[in-house]
Amino acid sequence: MAWFLARLKLIEELIMTKFIRTLSISTAFALLVACAAGTSPGVGAWDVIIETPVGSQAGVWTINADGTGTMGSDQGDQAIEGIALEGNTIAFDVDIDAGGQSLSLSFSGTVNEDSLDGEFSSDFGPVPVSGSRQ
């Protein structure tokens, strides 16, 4: 009987060792896949300068991986939805209130490490935007 119990304990230890090894390998693989997928270089907070026809406007943009974000300025925050993040490009459409007049703008830009360059397309022509990661 003692032999049987010792053998049973050895089998339990082998099963547990294999289980822990399999769990460790699975966890390491999941972490590698998550790291390889990464996030878009556009995700994060950006200090931006918008060169409008009436002068430069400073602001802070927050771009989230889920395609949402905010455009912040001294005039308040504007929610952004539907942000397209592909490779190092960022694109979105936004409607803003400019002194009681609604403007529809389309932004298209490129991220290069910690800098952002692009422009809004508007009825008044292109509006350049430059930024740096916070």
Image (cartoon, helix red, strand yellow):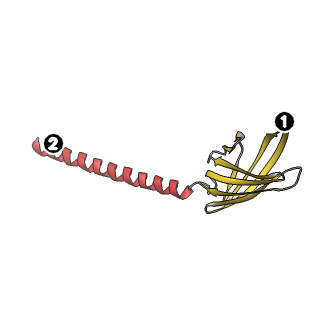
Which callout, 2 or 1, points at the residue further toward the start of the chain?
Answer: 2
In front: 12, or 81? 81
Three-letter code for the amino acid on which mark 1 is drawn: Gly
Three-letter code for the amino acid on which mark 2 is drawn: Leu
Q: Residue at x 65, y 61 (%)?
A: 115
Looking at the image, the residue that sits furthest to the bottom is: 112
Q: Residue at x 71, y 54 (%)?
A: 49
Q: Residue at x 48, y 57 (%)?
A: 32
Q: Quadrant of the C terminus?
A: bottom right
Q: How many marks?
A: 2
Disc 2 crowd, CA 10 A, few/some/many (<14, 14-19, 20+): few
* Residue 61 shown left or right of residue 94 in the figure: left
Disc 1 crowd, CA 10 A, few/some/many (<14, 14-19, 20+): few
Q: Residue 55 at x, y = what percent? A: 79, 53
The correct choice, above or below, for 93 with respect to 109 in the image is: above
Q: Residue 86 at x, y = what percent? A: 68, 56
Q: Quadrant of the N terminus?
A: top left
CA–CA distance in space, label 2 to label 1: 84 Å
Mark 1 residue element: loop
The correct choice, above or below, for 77 with respect to 86 in the image is: above
In front: 2, or 68? 68
Mark 2 residue element: helix
To which residue does mark 2 refer? 5
In front: 98, or 43? 98
In this rendering, does residue 3 appear at all? yes
In front: 92, or 6? 92
Q: Residue 87 at x, y = what percent? A: 66, 59
* Residue 46 shown left or right of residue 24 in the figure: right
* Residue 37 shown left or right of residue 95 in the figure: left
Q: Residue at x 83, y 38 (%)?
A: 99
The disc label shown at residue 100, or none: 1
* Residue 58 shown left or right of residue 10 in the figure: right
